[in-house]
Amino acid sequence: MRIATYVHDGRRLHGVVEDTVVRPLPDGVSPLDAVGVRPVGPAVPLADVRLLPPLEPPTIRDFVTFEEHVEGVRRSVDGATGVPAAWYDAPTFYFTNPYAVVGPYDDVPVPPGSQVLDFELEVAAVVGREGRDLTPRQARDHIVGYTILNDWSARDLQSREMQVGLGPCKGKDTAVTLGPYLVTADELEPYRDSEGFLRLGLTATVNGEVVGEDLLSNMSWTFEEMVAYASRGSVVRPGDVLGSGTCGNGGCLAELWGVRGERRPPPLRPGDTVTLTVEGIGSLTNTVVAGTAPVPLPAARRRTRERP
């Protein structure tokens, strides 16, 4: 099933996508509960609806599972070479902002104060059942489906703030695109290879020009292993989103800058349109628009330490 969240005739609905139309699900059925539920009501052309993010996730864990991406971005952001030895230990992630989620065709503003905006082409697994301390085998039954994720990144803000040894924060706080649909896990089983990876083709274009192509199966951990790690000593709950991390071979501009030693293609500007396409799932197309100016704040106070 391909499950969409959309607006039609002023109503927010969930529905099942069939070719070029969407049919609404019964009232009260969420995208996470839709597997096996028959849609009701008349079919509506997708061209006549506004697609929203397929779900409102309570949490978004964004992993970094593509070795090629780590190497290229590291060179671009902080000038370092190679991949840190610790990266190979476990599938590292950070929590990003669930309140910043935007739809598959929404405009994306430039983050306040940034001059170096970038996209990131990722696929995300969506948790459908609660679990704790899961094995990878158990975790497979906890994944309800997959969607595309664009982790918009203000590289100049990110580079500066991560010198503190914490983050990223405002470098990745303005927008996260999800969509266009939640594709249920069974639909993507034919793409699974012998190691358990989903062999899906990934393509990124900027203003219609291809800048990146990769395979999702170039991940170094499976989604099941990522879910298991996320649940270690913790809990995953329905609606949690786990991003694959950015693919290699041009999954973002910063990786290309690191490889080429120059900002080519240039950072995104208002008017630029980014399209991310994932085989078996669909495409996202977002246009960058001007953002707001940052509200000024003072620098940290340098204190003369006093003791009570």
Image (cartoon, grey):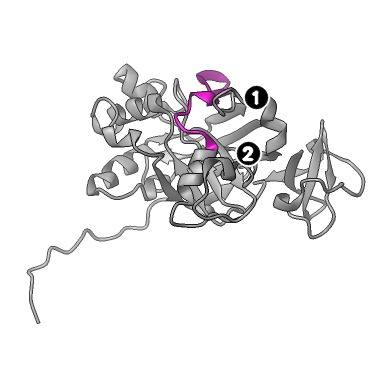
Whether residue 146 appears in this view of the structure is yes
Q: Quadrant location of residue 27?
A: bottom right
Determine the CA span between mark 1 and mark 2.
Answer: 13 Å
Where residue 281 appears, x then y in whole percent? Answer: 67, 31
First along the sequence among labels 1 and 2: 2
Where residue 88 appears, x then y in whole percent? Answer: 34, 33
The quarter of the picture where the C terminus appears is bottom left
Q: Tell which residue pokes out farthest to the bottom in this image.
A: 308
At label 2, which amino acid type do we have? Tyr
At 49% across and 39% down in the image, what residue appears?
225
Let me know if residue 203 is in the magenta part.
yes
- Secondary element type, mark 2: strand
Within 10 Å of the Cα at label 1, are there few (<14), some (14-19), or many (20+) other Cα atoms?
some
At 56% across and 30% down in the image, what residue appears?
273
For the magenta stretch, what is the residue range?
Answer: 202-223
Within 10 Å of the Cα at label 2, are there few (<14), some (14-19), or many (20+) other Cα atoms?
many
At label 1, which amino acid type do we have? Tyr
Determine whether 136 is above or below 20 in the image.
below
Whether residue 206 appears in this view of the structure is no
Residue 146: mark in rendering: 2
